[in-house]
Every structure is written in C-alpha cells, then in structure tokens.
C-alpha cells in the first residue's frame, strides 16, 4: 500500500478576477520511505497541492489518502516544514519548539525532552537546545523546524521549499543533512521546490508540474546511487531531462 | 545613568529658581525644605499610607481593566459577532476622558474608593483592549498552521500559541494601561476621594498653602511611576519579548 495517494485532485476557487484553477486533476503516489519532489514554476499549484496533503486546504474534487486513510484536516500522521524561518515559536527554545507536538500528544515532560534532544542531535543542533530561535541562523532554524516535524514520529514529512530562503552554500549543506536524516528515519517525504538540481539531489521520483492550470506534466524517476554527486554526468543528464520537461511547457 | 543626569539637571534648575528670590518661599520652597517635609511625612507614615491607598486604587482599577481588556480583546479578535457588537461602543466611549465621568460616578457611588476605582478602570481598559485585539490579530498565521499540524486546537492552541504570540502587544497594552491608570488616579482622588490618597493630599494641601506637601507628594507620584515604568515593565519585557526577540513586532 502507498504511504500517500493523491487521486484526481483538483482545487479551484473564486477571485474577483474570476475562477482560478489552482490544481487540475493531479494524481500521484508515494511508496513508504520514498522521497518525492514536486517541481514546477511558480503558479503551478505545487504548494497548494502540498497544503491539501497537509490538510490545510480541502480539494474541490478527488481525494488524498495517507496510509490508506482519507485526509480530512491536519493530523499527527504528517509533519510539516515551511519555507519561512518565522515558523518556529519565538517564545520557545529550540528544544521546547521540537517538543511541542509531543506536548500536544500528552507525552510526559522527561520523555518528551529526551525525544526532542534526540531529534536535535539528528540535525546536529544538540548544543543549541536551549537557544531561542532569534539567536539561531536561518539554516539552524530550518533544522530545528525539521526536528520539530519529526519529533512526534509522523510517517510522512511534508516540506515546502524549506531551503529556498537560504544562501547557496548553506542550502547545499542542508540538502546533504536532509539526505542523511531521510536515510536514518526512512520517512516518506513530499518536497516542494522550484530548484531542479535540488530535486535531482534529493528525490527518488520527481513530479513535474506546469502552471495555468496547475497539473502534473511528467513523472521522472531518479535512479542514482546515494550520496549523489551533483557534478557527475548522470546527475547532469537528469537535470537536463527535468529542465526539458519544464521548458517544453513554457513553449506550449 | 543618563536618566539620572537629566533628573539632576532639572532639580538644579528648580533649586536655582527657588533661591533666586523672585517668588515667595511659601510658593516655591527649596529642595531641602521639600525633602524635609517628605522625610517627616515618611517618618510618621502618612505618606506611605496615602501612597498605599493610591496604589490600592490603581491596582484594583487595573485588575478590572486588564481582565475586561484581555477577555473582550481576545473575543473581539476571534468572533465577528462580538467585534460587531462592541466595536461601535468602544469607538463611542473611548474618546470620553475618564475624569469626565467623575461627577457621575460620585452621584452614583458617593465619594470614596468605588468612584475612584471606576475612573481608573475607565481610563485603563481601552489601551488594554485595543492592544490585546491588535495582538491577537497580529499572531503569525504560520504559527497557528504549524501548531494545528502538530495537533493543537481549542484552548491549548489559545494558551500555547495565541497568548504568547500576542504578548508583545499585551505587554505594550499593560504598560499604557498602567500609565493611564496612574494619571487618572491622581485626578480621580482630587475629585472623588476623601481623606486618603496622594491626589487627595495635593488637593487638600492647596487649602492651607502647603506647597511643600504638594511638591513632596508630586515627587512620590513621579517616583512610583518611574519605578513601575523602568523596573516592573522593564523587567517584564526583558524576561519575555526581549528574550524572545519579539520586540520588533511590538513596535511595528
């Protein structure tokens, strides 16, 4: 059984300028522990689709299943990481942020502190457990956000361009770290990005989307051994393939 | 340190005027004369009793105002119906100076604590309410989204996210409410109190041309206000929004 099933999902809404079709008839699945990237230009509905999987938005047609169960609203079976560093609670230290989900699950304090510290160790931030977010760099804040989304042990990790606001060097570092975290935790990941190289580096499978209306254009499997070398010929070939799907839609 | 220099300069200027011989010493007593009166009043406990009476009225009024302001502010931010009902009332009542109610409250409740406390309450409710409402509305939607994704809802979402998220505004509201209350209480005591309170002492001293008592009481009023502004609210801010790096949101 798939960890995630997106079946003929559409979302349209009314604006003063008329009806907007944000997503049209999108379908894809993710096997357990699979890393899936949603790639596409802005306006292709990739974030909207992620928000529907997260349960923040309800599709106007179609259905989404997590572990075979239809999604209705948010749930602790999914962890979410946003692009904006401001997603952390500024009034909580790193470890208190990470422990939030466990607190909501009524896990007793000693246990949730232990688990939260383990998660911080996973993203190599155990030294900053008691720092407040505003004392952490952008990359560190995103690592805390990843630890926070993993702490209550959801099967699925949803990520919305988590490294897009970081500088290039930090981004590379974060991608390596995420690849390691994913290898260790074996979560099913849906990762939204507009960065083709990032998708080739991280994903088992890339869902290429096109805009106006947002729809699935192509599905590309990346069968490269890990850790991946972004300078290898095969890596560049995959990048070219994805780019060709993306430029083809611009011509259309 | 700079505050001390400014205060010393102002005192020196006053002393120069008092000793210039331009005004009768009974009307502009020198600082040592005022200090002497103040010391006498402190030694026999009259000043402390008056100050305690005033502080009691301030805190009774502030307690009512804070409760009302917090509850109504959060409810107005959360529920459209509450907002629609109370918003015109707030707009109509807010511009009325609290002291303008003094004659009405005196007729209804007589001279004494009730009328005084009600005037303080009236003066300090609005800053508390307006800031609480603004703070609740300014809570970053991303925090709510992240918290809901981690299973927070209802009262736990309110106490663990909305309240701390609104705290920069709530603390600003408290600070303004205290300032308003402290200003209002002195005026209220002049009009509506009998026998006790710093405002009443000043008003009563006028009858006997006791300028030294008036100025000594003013010094106590200023000192208490200063201590609260700098120490109480300064400490509160350092322990919360400064520590969390949230001061900028409060000023924005």
Image (spheres, coloured by chain):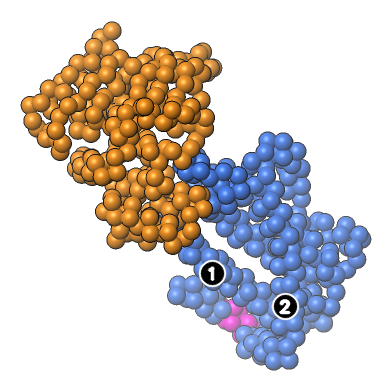
Query: Given the image, what chain letter belongs to the residue carrying mark 2?
Result: B
- Chain the render paints orange: A
Residue A39 point in image, percent of width and height: 29, 24
Tell me if A65 is positioned left or right of A15 in this view.
left
Q: In the rendering, at what x and y percent does residue B190 appear?
A: 80, 69
Badge 1 and badge 2 both on one subunit: yes
User: Quarter of the image holding residue A130?
Assistant: bottom left
| Residue most extreme to the front | A1
User: Magenta span covers which residues?
Assistant: B13-21
Q: Is residue B1 left or right of residue A144?
A: right
The residue located at (76%, 42%) in the rendering is B89
**Callout 2: SS:** helix
Task: Tell me which label, 1 or 2, sits earlier in the chain.
Answer: 2
Q: Is residue A199 above or below residue B226?
A: above
Residue located beneath label 2 in the image? B52
Residue depicted at x 64% and y 77%: B219
Mark 1 to mark 2: distance in Å? 20 Å
Residue B13 horizontal side relative to residue A138, left or right: right
Q: Nearer the viewer, residue B203 or A92?
A: A92
Give the farthest residue toward the left: A233
Question: Is residue B16 within the magenta segment?
Answer: yes
Q: Is residue A86 magenta?
A: no
Residue density around tag 2, few if under 14, some if 14–19, many if 20 or more, within 10 Å: some
Quarter of the image holding residue B172?
bottom right
Question: Which chain is painted in blue?
Answer: B
- Chain of the residue displaying label 1: B
Which mark, by number, is residue B230?
Answer: 1
The residue closer to the viewer here, B22 or B147, is B147
The image shows residue B192 at horizontal and vertical percentages of 84, 67
């Amino acid at each position: 059984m798939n960890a995630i099933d997106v079946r003929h999902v559409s979302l349209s809404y009314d604006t003063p300028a008329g009806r907007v079709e944000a997503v049209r008839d999108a379908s894809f699945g993710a096997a357990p522990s699979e890393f899936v990237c949603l790639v596409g230009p802005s306006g292709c509905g990739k974030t909207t689709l992620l928000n529907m999987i997260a349960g923040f938005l309800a599709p106007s047609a179609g259905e989404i299943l997590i572990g075979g169960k239809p999604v209705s609203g948010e749930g602790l079976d999914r962890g979410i990481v946003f692009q904006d560093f401001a997603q952390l609670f500024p009034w909580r230290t790193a470890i208190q942020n990470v422990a939030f989900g466990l607190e909501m699950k009524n896990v007793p304090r000693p246990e949730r502190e232990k688990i939260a510290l383990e998660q911080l160790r996973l993203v190599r931030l155990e030294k900053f457990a008691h720092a407040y977010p505003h004392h952490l760099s952008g990359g560190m804040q995103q690592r805390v956000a990843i630890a926070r989304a993993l702490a209550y042990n959801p099967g699925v990790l949803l990520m919305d361009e988590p490294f897009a606001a970081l500088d290039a060097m930090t981004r590379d570092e974060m991608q390596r770290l995420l690849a390691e975290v994913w290898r260790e935790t074996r979560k099913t990941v849906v990762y939204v990005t507009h960065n083709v190289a990032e998708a080739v580096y991280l994903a088992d499978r890339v869902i290429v989307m096109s805009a106006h209306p947002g729809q699935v254009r192509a599905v590309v499997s990346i069968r490269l051994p890990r850790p991946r070398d972004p300078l290898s010929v095969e890596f560049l070939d995959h990048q070219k393939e994805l780019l060709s799907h993306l430029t083809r839609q611009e011509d259309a | 340190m700079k505050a001390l220099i400014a205060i010393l300069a102002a005192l020196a200027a006053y002393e120069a005027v008092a000793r210039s011989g331009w005004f009768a010493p009974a009307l502009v007593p020198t600082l040592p004369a005022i200090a002497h009166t103040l010391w006498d009043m402190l030694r026999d406990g009259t000043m402390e009793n008056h100050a305690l009476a005033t502080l009691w009225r301030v805190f009774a009024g502030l307690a009512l105002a804070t409760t009302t302001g917090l509850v109504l502010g959060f409810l107005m931010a959360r529920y459209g119906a509450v907002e629609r009902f109370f918003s015109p009332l707030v707009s109509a009542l807010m511009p009325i100076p609290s002291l303008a109610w003094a004659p009405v409250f005196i007729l209804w409740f007589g001279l004494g604590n009730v009328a005084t406390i009600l005037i303080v309450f009236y003066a300090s409710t609005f800053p508390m309410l307006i800031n609480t409402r603004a703070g609740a509305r300014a809570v970053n939607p991303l925090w709510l989204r992240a918290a809901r994704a981690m299973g927070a809802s209802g009262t736990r979402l309110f106490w663990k996210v909305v309240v701390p998220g609104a705290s920069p505004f709530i603390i600003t509201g408290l600070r303004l409410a205290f300032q308003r209350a402290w200003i209002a209480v002195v005026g209220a005591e002049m009009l509506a109190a009998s026998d006790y309170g710093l405002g009443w002492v000043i008003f009563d001293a006028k009858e006997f041309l006791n300028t030294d008592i008036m100025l000594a009481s003013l010094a106590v009023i200023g000192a208490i206000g200063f201590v609260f502004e700098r120490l109480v609210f300064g400490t509160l801010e350092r322990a919360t929004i400064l520590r969390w790096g949230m001061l900028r949101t409060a000023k924005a």
